[in-house]
Image (tube, rainbow, N blue to C red):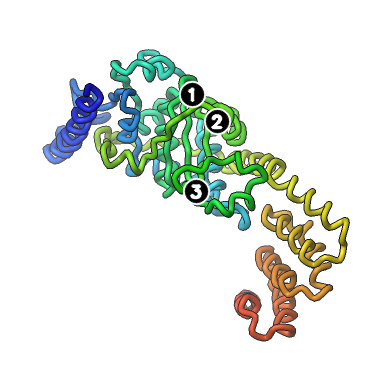
């Protein structure tokens, strides 16, 4: 009963705050630095109803959007075509946040480690804008900022409040049948209600994406946790957009080269754990039958998926020499990615000599010809 009353009060408070914020904007009653509602705990929430935290997550804050777009721009330029895009974008957002000099520190007045265990205590949680400006936040506040960045990029996100950590989860939007393709160990992701989720520990922000990921998996293992998805929670606890409106911009753009280097390090670890075992297994099978075209294409495909084109090309060439149309097309595709348009055209033409109606080759040849004429 008490929980239901608190939930009703919280919903009424959210509606009141948004309405009052809009009225303040229309009447010009905003302070020079920021507008906040006096005597009303707009940052407040009760951990007896964890879904209330969703009201702190926003996709409309200009400074959060600016940082998110900057990092996604770096990611788009460096994406590996064969790997899950959402995983890669999350890496860029996480490492960008880490390199933005945002520190994870306990809140002196209401530390997460104790306040979220007291169902009667109203906790004060920073909004993403505040964490960006102060450059520090408790684990839940870092989580709110990171979830806002992920949600702003279009990724479904959620969180798990643990006794000693705050876990953020994001959806890879990967079909369950595709999990074995991208992961050597299917236990490295969490499948929940049709979602394929990656968990990240906010207390491990300073250790990088991979440590945060595998550390979160260890903490969640056997913990009997409940995950609160933000898009579901927003129905009851919509974002507090507009309560804090700062006049000045807050730029925390990390160095682009540093972000790329950090993500490349993450990718190397990811590949070592999830793909090198697959490569070794494919090599072992191929050693027993070196003329198996299917095994050759399988090995080359794994190499290509992780961007190891120098390793993939000779394997595909061996399969192509044995008449594999698939290998020829893939050699053309790799040549296109590497902007070797002349080589790409040669490979697509070889396919069409064997299969004149091959759609992949016809489309590839058209694109290669256009690029050669530019």
Q: Position of residue 353 (x, y in %)?
A: 74, 85
Q: Tell which circle, 3 or 2, labels the residue nearer the N-terminal end.
A: 3
Q: Tell me if 275 is positioned left or right of 8 in this view.
A: right
Closer to the camera, 221 or 154?
Answer: 221
Under circle 1, the secondary element is loop
Which residue is at a point 39% across and 39% down the rendered structure image?
229
Q: Residue furthest left?
A: 27
Residue 36 shows in the view? no
Asked whether the beta carbons under mark 3 and mark 2 sit within 8 Å of each other, the answer is no
Q: Tell me if 79 is positioned left or right of 311 in this view.
A: left
Nearer the observer, disc 3 or disc 1? Answer: 1
**Pointer 3 residue:** 72
**Pointer 2 residue:** 216
Q: Position of residue 10 (x, y in %)?
A: 22, 29
Q: Tell which circle, 1 or 2, labels the residue nearer the N-terminal end.
A: 1
**Pointer 1 residue:** 165
């Amino acid at each position: 009963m008490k929980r239901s009353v608190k939930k009703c009060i919280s919903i009424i408070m959210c509606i009141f705050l948004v309405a009052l914020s809009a009225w303040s904007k229309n009447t010009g009653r905003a302070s020079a630095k920021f507008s906040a509602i006096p005597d009303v705990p707009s940052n407040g929430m009760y951990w007896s109803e964890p879904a209330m935290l969703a009201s702190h997550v926003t996709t409309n804050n200009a400074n959060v959007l600016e940082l998110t777009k900057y990092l996604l721009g770096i990611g788009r330029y460096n994406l590996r075509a064969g790997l899950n895009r959402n995983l890669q974008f999350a890496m860029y957002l996480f490492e960008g946040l880490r390199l933005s000099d945002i520190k994870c520190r306990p809140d002196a007045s209401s530390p997460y480690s104790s306040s979220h265990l007291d169902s009667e205590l109203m906790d004060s949680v920073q909004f993403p804008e505040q964490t960006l400006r102060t450059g520090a936040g408790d684990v839940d506040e870092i989580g709110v900022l990171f979830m806002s960045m992920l949600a702003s990029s279009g990724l479904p996100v959620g969180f798990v409040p643990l006794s000693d950590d705050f876990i953020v989860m994001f959806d890879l939007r990967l079909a369950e049948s595709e999990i074995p393709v991208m992961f050597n160990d299917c236990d490295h992701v969490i499948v929940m209600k049709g979602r394929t989720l990656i968990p990240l520990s906010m207390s491990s922000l300073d250790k990088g994406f991979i440590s945060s990921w595998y550390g979160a998996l260890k903490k969640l293992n056997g913990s009997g946790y409940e995950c609160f998805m933000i898009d579901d929670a927003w129905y009851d606890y919509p974002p507090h957009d507009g309560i804090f409106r700062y006049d000045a911009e807050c730029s925390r753009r990390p160095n682009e080269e540093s972000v790329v280097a950090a993500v490349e390090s993450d990718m190397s670890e990811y590949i070592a754990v999830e793909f090198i075992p697959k490569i070794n297994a494919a090599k072992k099978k191929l050693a027993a039958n070196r003329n198996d075209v299917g095994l050759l294409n399988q090995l080359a495909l794994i190499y290509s998926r992780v961007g190891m084109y120098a390793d993939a090309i000779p394997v595909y060439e061996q399969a192509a020499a044995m008449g594999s149309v698939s290998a020829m097309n893939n050699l053309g595709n790799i040549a296109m990615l590497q902007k070797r348009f002349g080589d790409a055209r040669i490979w697509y033409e070889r396919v069409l000599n064997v299969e004149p109606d091959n759609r992949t080759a016809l489309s590839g040849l058209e694109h290669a010809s256009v690029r050669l004429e530019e």
